[in-house]
Amino acid sequence: MQYLHAHWRINYVKISKGGRKSPFLRALRAKNRREALLLYKGPCSFALLNRYPYNPGHMLALPFREVEQLHELSEEERTDLWRTIFLCEEVLRSVMDPQGFNIGFNLGSAAGAGIPKHLHCHVVPRWERDTNFMPVIGAMKVIPQALLSLYDQLLPCFKEREGKE
């Protein structure tokens, strides 16, 4: 048997499914935005890099308020969340030049939500043939760029837009 050591995932494994605050709220309130991978704060929503990405550039857009379902959001929160989702797509398109996107929500544990009590939208850039033999044969995904390196690359685009909101 082969082992893949992914020590950085231990924090995800340790997250309580119970009453503790979501890691998203901790990221939102973090003193060090870079360490939290927090790229953008709008009036009612924010965006951050996914610490456990499916693909390079995988971002999350979330409302400030912790809710499980879309209908729980106010009109203002829904509008701002969609603005943030569009902003994520725009910035990723300009910086990473993807050929497509997967954008969507997993609402509830049955739908695959890892943290169901705080809904979040996945914004995942995609490229032709970005699924190669590694996930198919090796059951392993290769992320070719370090998260903090990508964060530093994306941040100027978000800062430029954050002041215009």
Image (cartoon, helix red, strand yellow):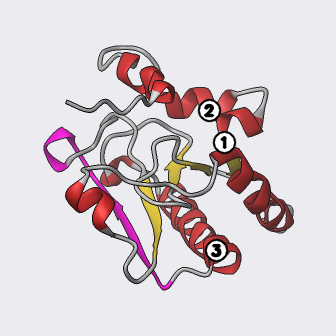
Q: Nearer the viewer, mark 1 or mark 2?
A: 1
Does residue 110 appear to the left or right of 25 in the view shown?
left
Q: Which residue is mark 1?
A: 37
Q: Nearer the viewer, residue 92 or 131?
A: 131
Q: Nearer the viewer, residue 81 or 5?
A: 5
Does residue 122 appear to the left or right of 134 in the view shown?
right
- Residue 108, image quadrant: top left
Q: Nearer the viewer, residue 71 or 62?
A: 62
Residue at image coords 50%, 58%: 58
Relative to 4, residue 113 above or below = below
Q: Nearer the viewer, mark 2 or mark 3?
A: 3
Marks 1 and 2 sit apart, C-alpha to C-alpha, by: 7 Å
What secondary structure is found at the residue carrying circle 3? helix
Q: Nearer the viewer, mark 3 or mark 1?
A: 3
User: Which sits earlier in the primary sequence, circle 3 or circle 1?
Assistant: 1
Percent across and percent down for residue 54 are 40, 55
Residue at image coords 26%, 32%: 2
Q: Is residue 42 visible?
A: no
User: Which sits earlier in the primary sequence, circle 2 or circle 3?
Assistant: 2
Position of the N terminus, as image quadrant, is top left
Near mark 2 (Cα within 10 A), the count class, few <14, some 14-19 or many ≥20, is: some
Q: Is residue 127 visible?
A: yes
Position of the C terminus, as image quadrant, is bottom right
Q: Which residue is mark 2?
A: 27
